[in-house]
Amino acid sequence: MDQYNFKVFLTNLLTQLASGDFNVFVECKNDKLFEARVIGYSEEYMRVKVRFFSDDLTKPGTKRVPTVSFGYVSEDEYDLVHIQVPVKEEDVYFSSIILKHYQKPELEIGDRVVKNNDTWIPNDFDSWGRGEGVGIVVEPPHPIDDDNDVDVKWPRGRCFEKINQLIKI
């Protein structure tokens, strides 16, 4: 089944790339999204190679350091030290990639959304997590007067959002 889903994903990805948009979102740990540029893909392994824009991304790694014993450094023996390694390029499994190209202007309750960095207007609610991660369009607690607004539940709270500031995923 994954192979079929990958073929559908790849068709959508290639359509997006053909439009000139090489940027995607990558869903990382804790539902955090990072924007990245597509630089390749592997059909065999169902992975997409991306280059991240953020300089803050790290992942666990190891570093070889010479063993020190009895006051001298051994040139033949090494210890492995656990460190955080910066991530600039990564091969990502296709299900963690969120395409930007397929966006419908109308959103329905239950739709998953991310903020559109091109149209996003920050406000005071951004400090508690507005626009971070993947949001879900939910039933508003009262009728909304503006047809261009939807109620979005973000991982750390909920807020009314303009539809043009969101991308359906």
Image (tube, helix red, strand yellow):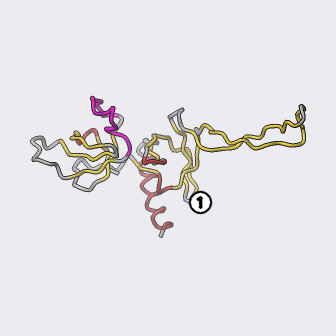
Give the image quarter of residue 144.
top left
The residue positioned 23% from the left and 42% from the top of the image is: 163
State left or right for residue 138 relative to residue 45.
Answer: left
Pinpoint residue 71: horizontal percent, then vertical percent: 89, 31
- Answer above or below: position of 38 versus 109: above
Q: How many marks?
A: 1
Side (left or right) of 122 relative to 36: left
User: What amino acid is at disc 1?
Assistant: Tyr
Left or right: 63 in relation to 3: right
The residue at the point 88 percent across, 34 percent down is: 73
Residue that sits furthest to the bottom in the current view: 1
The location of residue 149, given as percent across then percent down, is 18, 42
Quadrant for residue 61, please give it.
top right
Which residues, given as a range, are shown in magenta? Answer: 118-133
User: Residue placed at 23% from the left, 40% from the top?
Assistant: 161
Q: Secondary structure at mark 1?
A: loop
Residue 106 is left or right of residue 42, and the answer is: left
- Mark 1, residue position: 45
Residue 131 screen position, x and y as percent: 33, 39
Mark 1 is surrounded, within 10 Å at the Cα level, by few (under 14), some (14 to 19) or many (20 or more) other residues, namely few
Residue that appears at 49% across and 66% down: 2
Would you say residue 158 sits in the magenta stretch?
Answer: no
User: Where is residue 133 shown, x and y percent of the image?
Assistant: 38, 44
Characterize the magenta stretch by its predominant secondary structure: loop
